Image: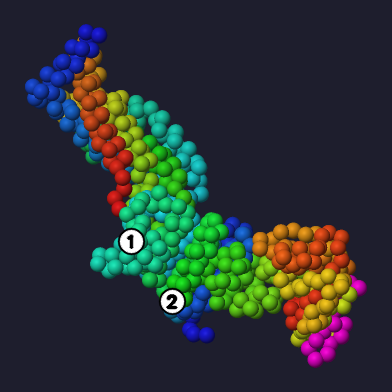
C-alpha cells in the first residue's frame, strides 16, 4: 500500500460524557475508495467531519501528507471536498452552485469556466446550467452537488451518504456515473454509507464502524465473507449466525456441532473452540427432498419451511433445521419447488461458504 | 377630515417650496436613524451569527433577553442613555448629551435587539449542515458568514426593515437624549411632538405625512432588494 495521504492517529471525539468516536488509526491512501459502513448513529458522519476538518476531535491527530494539521484548518479544507446526503445547494443557478467552491478558493475566472463546463457535462447537467437550483429534482440536485465537489479537483473526496435520499432508479444511475468518474479520476475517496451494497459497489476497502469503533477494515471480500464478530456479520448481511463448537478437525475441515446437527466448515481454528457459524443467505441452495443434491456442497440439512417473504428481487425463506436457517432463492425457484410454510426442503451449502468466528459462549 | 386634507396640502407645499426647516429635520431623521440602523445591523448580525452558529451555552437565555429587548420601552432607554451621558455620568466626559450622536446611541440600543432577535431566528432557520457545506467548499469564516447571510437574505432584510422602523419612528428617547434642538437634534418625530404641543396641527400632520413618505420610499427600496432574484 502506498504512503497514506491522510492519517488519523488516536482520534477520540466526545460530546459531554458520550464517546462518539474512537479511532486509534486509519489511513486514507491515494487512488483508493474507502467505504465506511455502519448502522445509523455509528459515528460515520462524525468521522467524515473530523477528516474534512469541520470538527476538531477531543483528542488525537490528523496528518495530511505526513504533516499534522494544527492551527487554521482552512488550507487543508481547501484540498478536500465534501458531499452531504442532502444536496445543500445555494439559492442561485446550477452553474453558480458548481462554481461556488472555485470562487471561494480563488481559482481564476477562465479556469473556473473550463472546469464548470467539464464537470456539469460529466454529471449530465450541462443543459441545466442556467436553471435555478430551487427548481431541480432530487437527482439533478445531487448531481449538481457532486459536480460542485469534483470541480474542485480535491485530493480527498468525502461522501456522506450521498445517495440515500434518492429513489432507486435515480440512485442507480448516479452510482454508475460516480463509479465511472472515480474509476477514471482515481481520487482518494472516503464514502460513508449505511447501505452495504453501495459499499460493495464503490469501495476498494471497507471499514465497518459500529459504536464509534472501526470493528473491521479490509477488502470487500474479507469483510463480507469473513466478518470478525457477530455484529459485523449481521450488519454485512450474514443472516444465519449460530453458536457451535468444533468437534473434529482434519486438514482444515472442521465438523461443528450446532444443536443436534453437524456442519462442516473450512477454518484455521482449533478443535474444541466455541464458535459462531456464519452463513450468507445467498450461499444456501434449496432443493426438494426428491431432487438430486448439489454435489459440490458438503452440508445438506433436512428442513421445514417456516416463513416465505419477498426480499427485492429474491424470496427470503426461513427454514427450521433444529435451528433457523435463512436462504435467498429466486421467485422462479420458489414456484418450481412449490414451497410454502410447512413444506419440507433440503438446504445445502459448501464448507467454504461457512465462516467461523471464535466466540465465548454466554 | 378637513384637518387631514389641509395637512396633506401643507405637506406638499412644504416639500415643493423647498422649506429648509422640513428638509433639515428630514435630513437629521435619516442621518441619525440610518446610522443607528447600520450600527444595529453590525451588532445584531454579529450577535445573531454567534448565537446561531456557535450555539454557546446560555443561548436560550440570551435569546430571551434579545426577544424581550424588542419590547424595550424607548423612554426607559432614553432615560438610561441620558444618565450615562450626563456630565456626572460614566460617559459624561464625552459631552455627547443633546447631540445627534446621543440620539444615534439611543436608537441603536432600541434597534439592536430587534435586528439581533430576528436575525438569529433567520439564521437558525437555515439547514445546520449548510454552514458545514459552505466551509467544506473552502470558505473562510467571513466568506461563510456572507454566503449564509445571502441565503437568509429575505428574513435578514425583514430584520433590517424592522430595525430601521424601530429607529426612525422612535420619539421618547430622541427628545430625552437629543433635547429637540432646532438645527441640530430635531428629527421628524420630535418636530411632530413639538408642533402638536404648540397646537399647530396642520404642520404636525404635514410632517407626519412626510415621515410616512420617507419610510414608504425606503422600505420599498429594501423590499425590492429583498424580493430580487439572486444573481447566478
Q: Residue at x 18, y 28 (%)?
A: B26
A292 to A310, vertically: above or below: below
Where is residue A256 shown, x and y percent of the image?
84, 79
Distance between the Cα atoms at labels 1 and 2?
Answer: 22 Å
Answer with left or right where residue B85 lies relative to residue A261: left
Q: Residue at x 24, y 33 (%)?
A: B218
Per the image, the residue denoted by label 1 is A99
Q: Residue at x 74, y 78 (%)?
A: A353
Quadrant in which residue B164 is drawn: top left
Answer with left or right where residue A217 lies relative to residue B130: right
In the image, is residue A208 part of the stretch drawn in magenta? no
Per the image, the residue denoted by label 2 is A184
Q: Residues within 10 Å of mark 2 (few under 14, many from 20)?
A: few
Dot 1: chain letter: A
Where is residue A351 shown, x and y percent of the image?
78, 81
Outermost residue to the front: A336
Badges 1 and 2, same chain: yes
Predominant SS along the magenta part: strand
- Tell me where the magenta segment starts and ends, as one range: A243-260
Q: Secondary structure at mark 2?
A: helix
Q: Residues within 10 Å of mark 1 (few under 14, many from 20)?
A: many
Outermost residue to the bottom: A251
Looking at the picture, the colour scheme in use is: rainbow
Amino acid at each position: 500500500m502506498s504512503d497514506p495521504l491522510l492519517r488519523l492517529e488516536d482520534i477520540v471525539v466526545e460530546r459531554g460524557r458520550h464517546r462518539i468516536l474512537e479511532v486509534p488509526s486509519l489511513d486514507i491512501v491515494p487512488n483508493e475508495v474507502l467505504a465506511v459502513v455502519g448502522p445509523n448513529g455509528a459515528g460515520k458522519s462524525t468521522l467524515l467531519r473530523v477528516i474534512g476538518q469541520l470538527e476538531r476531535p477531543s483528542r488525537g491527530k490528523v496528518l495530511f501528507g505526513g504533516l499534522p494539521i494544527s492551527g487554521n484548518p482552512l488550507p487543508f479544507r481547501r484540498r478536500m471536498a465534501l458531499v452531504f446526503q442532502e444536496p445543500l445547494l445555494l439559492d442561485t443557478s446550477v452553474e453558480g452552485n458548481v462554481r461556488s467552491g472555485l470562487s471561494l478558493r480563488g481559482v481564476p475566472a477562465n479556469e473556473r469556466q473550463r472546469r464548470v463546463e467539464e464537470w456539469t457535462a460529466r454529471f449530465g447537467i450541462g443543459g441545466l446550467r442556467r436553471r435555478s437550483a430551487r427548481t431541480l429534482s432530487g437527482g439533478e440536485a445531487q448531481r449538481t452537488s457532486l459536480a460542485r465537489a469534483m470541480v474542485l479537483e480535491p485530493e480527498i473526496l468525502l461522501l456522506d451518504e450521498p445517495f440515500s435520499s434518492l429513489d432507486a432508479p435515480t440512485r442507480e444511475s448516479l452510482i454508475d456515473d460516480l463509479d465511472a468518474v472515480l474509476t477514471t479520476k482515481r481520487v482518494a475517496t472516503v464514502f460513508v454509507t449505511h447501505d452495504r451494497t453501495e459499499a460493495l459497489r464503490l469501495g476498494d476497502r471497507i471499514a465497518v464502524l459500529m459504536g464509534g469503533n472501526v470493528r473491521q477494515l479490509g477488502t470487500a471480500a474479507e469483510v463480507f465473507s469473513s466478518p470478525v464478530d457477530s455484529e459485523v456479520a449481521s450488519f454485512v448481511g450474514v443472516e444465519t449466525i449460530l453458536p457451535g463448537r468444533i468437534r473434529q478437525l482434519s486438514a482444515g475441515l472442521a465438523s461443528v456441532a450446532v444443536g443436534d446437527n453437524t456442519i462442516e466448515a473450512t477454518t484455521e481454528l482449533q478443535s474444541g473452540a466455541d464458535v459462531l457459524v456464519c452463513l450468507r443467505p445467498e450461499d444456501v441452495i434449496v432443493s426438494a427432498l426428491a431432487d438430486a443434491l448439489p454435489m459440490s456442497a458438503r452440508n445438506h440439512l433436512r428442513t421445514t419451511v417456516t416463513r416465505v417473504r419477498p426480499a427485492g428481487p429474491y424470496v427470503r425463506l426461513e427454514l427450521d433445521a433444529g435451528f433457523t436457517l435463512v436462504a435467498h432463492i429466486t421467485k422462479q425457484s420458489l414456484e418450481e419447488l412449490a414451497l410454502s410454510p410447512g413444506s419440507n426442503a433440503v438446504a445445502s451449502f459448501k464448507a467454504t461458504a461457512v465462516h467461523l468466528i471464535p466466540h465465548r459462549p454466554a | 377630515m378637513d384637518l387631514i386634507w389641509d395637512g396633506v396640502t401643507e405637506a406638499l407645499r412644504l416639500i415643493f417650496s423647498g422649506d429648509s426647516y422640513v428638509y433639515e429635520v428630514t435630513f437629521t431623521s435619516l442621518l441619525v436613524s440610518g446610522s443607528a440602523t447600520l450600527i444595529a445591523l453590525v451588532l445584531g448580525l454579529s450577535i445573531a451569527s454567534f448565537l446561531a452558529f456557535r450555539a454557546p451555552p446560555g443561548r436560550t437565555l440570551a435569546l430571551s433577553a434579545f426577544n424581550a429587548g424588542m419590547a424595550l420601552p424607548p423612554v426607559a432607554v432614553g432615560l438610561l442613555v441620558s444618565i450615562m451621558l450626563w456630565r456626572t455620568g460614566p460617559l459624561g466626559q464625552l459631552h455627547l448629551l443633546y447631540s445627534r450622536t446621543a440620539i444615534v446611541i439611543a436608537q441603536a440600543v432600541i434597534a439592536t435587539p430587534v435586528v439581533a432577535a430576528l436575525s438569529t431566528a433567520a439564521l437558525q432557520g437555515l439547514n445546520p449542515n449548510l454552514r458545514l457545506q459552505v466551509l467544506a467548499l473552502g470558505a473562510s469564516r467571513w466568506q461563510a458568514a456572507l454566503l449564509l447571510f445571502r441565503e437568509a437574505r429575505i428574513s435578514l432584510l425583514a430584520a433590517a426593515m424592522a430595525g430601521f422602523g424601530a429607529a426612525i419612528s422612535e420619539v421618547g428617547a430622541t427628545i430625552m437624549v437629543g433635547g429637540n434642538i432646532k438645527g441640530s437634534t430635531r428629527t421628524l418625530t420630535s418636530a411632530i411632538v413639538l408642533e402638536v404641543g404648540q397646537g399647530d396641527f396642520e404642520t404636525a400632520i404635514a410632517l407626519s405625512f412626510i415621515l410616512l413618505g420617507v419610510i414608504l420610499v425606503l422600505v420599498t427600496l429594501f423590499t425590492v432588494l429583498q424580493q430580487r432574484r439572486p444573481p447566478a
